[in-house]
Image (tube, helix red, strand yellow):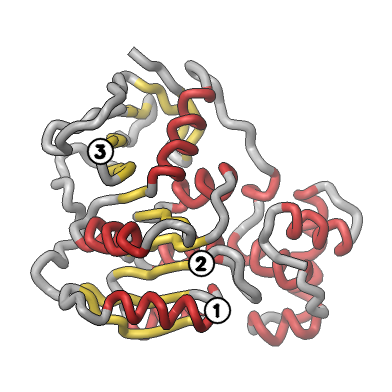
Amino acid sequence: MLAIGFKSELGKIECRGRILMGWGALERPRCLVYKSRGSQSLRRTLFVGRIGFRAIHRKSTTRMLTGARDIHMAKAKILITDDHRVVIEGIKSALRDHEDFEVVGEAVNGRDAVRKVRTLEPDIVIMDISMPDLNGIDSTLQIKKINPDVAVIIFSMYSSKEYVIDLFRAGISAYILKEDPMSQLLAALKEAKAGRKYFSEMVQQIMLDHLTNAGPGQAMAKDPFEGLSLREREVFQLLAEGASIKDIARRLNLSPKTVESHKYHILQKLKVQSVNDLTKMAIRKKIISI
C-alpha cells in the first residue's frame, strides 16, 4: 500500500490505493486511486504501461473512461501552437498521412491560441510552453476555462517538475518532450482523441517521483505565483517582457489605471519591489527567455 496526499483545487486529497510497478497489458492497469474528503468526489487512476504514463481524471466515478467528449468516429480538429515555424511544419508533415486528424489552424503564441480556440473550436490543441505575449501554461488555463473539453497536449523542450505539476493541475491531456520521437506525439494525439491522457516516459517518472516523495498527508508547498489571477498572470508576463503600462492596456483592452492596479497587486502577492524583480522571477520560471 502506498499512501500519498497532496493539495488540489478540491481540497485535501488522501490516497487510498496502491501502485504496482512493472509492465503489462493496459486492460488490467496498475493503478493509484485518490478520493477527496470534501463534498465533491475525485478519482484519479494512473496507468503504467509499455507506451508510457496515462491518467484518467474524473469528478464523477460513474462517467465513462472516454470522458464527456466522443470524437472517436470523426476527424479530430487540431490547433498547433508554437513560436517556431519549423516545429509547426514538422507536426503538419507528420500528420499528413493520418486521416483521423485535421489541422484547422496555427498559432504563434498563447494569446493567439486562445483567440483561435474561440473561433475554430478545435478538439485538440498542441501547445508549446515558452512563448512571447502569453505562455503555454496561462493559455492552457484560459483555454480550459473557455471549453474544458478541449484536449491540450504540451509539446515542449522543458521537463522541469514545476512545469509538469502545474500543467497537470491545469488539466492537460498529454505532455510530450520535443526530444522524444514523433511517434510519441502521435500516440498522445490518439489517446487524446479517445478521451484519455498520455505522458511520455520521462514525464511519467517526474510525476511518480513527485507523488512518492510527497509523503502521507503532506500538503504541497504553495507557490505565491499560483495566487495570481489569470489576468494578473497575463500582466506579469507582459511586464517581465518589458512592455509599458500603456502598451499592456492596449493589448489587453484595459485602461492604464486598471493595469497599474494589477501591477500593484502582483508586486504585493509575490512580495517583490520592482518590475526588475518580476523579470528575474519570469526568467527563473522560464516564462520568458533572455
2 vs 1, front mark:
1
Q: Quadrant of residue 126?
A: bottom left
What kind of residue is marked 2? Asp
Up-down relation of residue 265 to residue 259 (above or below): above
Q: Which mark is residue 232?
A: none
Residue drawn at x 83%, y 47% as measured from the top left: 271
For label 1, the crowd category at 10 Å Cα-Cα, with few meaning under 14, some 14 to 19 and many 20 or more, is few
Q: Is residue 267 left or right of residue 98?
A: right
Tell me which label, 1 or 3, sits earlier in the chain. Answer: 3
Question: Which residue is nearer to you in this view: 17 or 146?
Answer: 17
Residue drawn at x 68%, y 58% as measured from the top left: 286
Residue drawn at x 49%, y 38% as measured from the top left: 206
Residue drawn at x 47%, y 41% as measured from the top left: 9
Q: Quadrant of residue 38?
A: top left
Q: Residue furthest top?
A: 1
Q: Is residue 207 left or right of residue 79?
A: right
Q: Are marks 1 and 3 in contact (CB under 8 Å)?
A: no
What kind of residue is marked 3? Gly
Cα–Cα gap, marks 3 and 2: 25 Å
Where residue 48 appears, as percent x and y from the top left, is 29, 35
What kind of residue is marked 1? His
Badge 3 element: strand
Q: Residue furthest left?
A: 73
Badge 1 element: loop
Q: Which mark is residue 49?
A: 3
Residue on which the image places disc 1:
84
Residue on which the image places disc 2:
128
* Residue 114, visible in the rendered structure: no
Tell me which label, 3 or 2, sits earlier in the chain. Answer: 3
Query: Which quarter of the image is occupied by the C terminus?
Result: bottom right
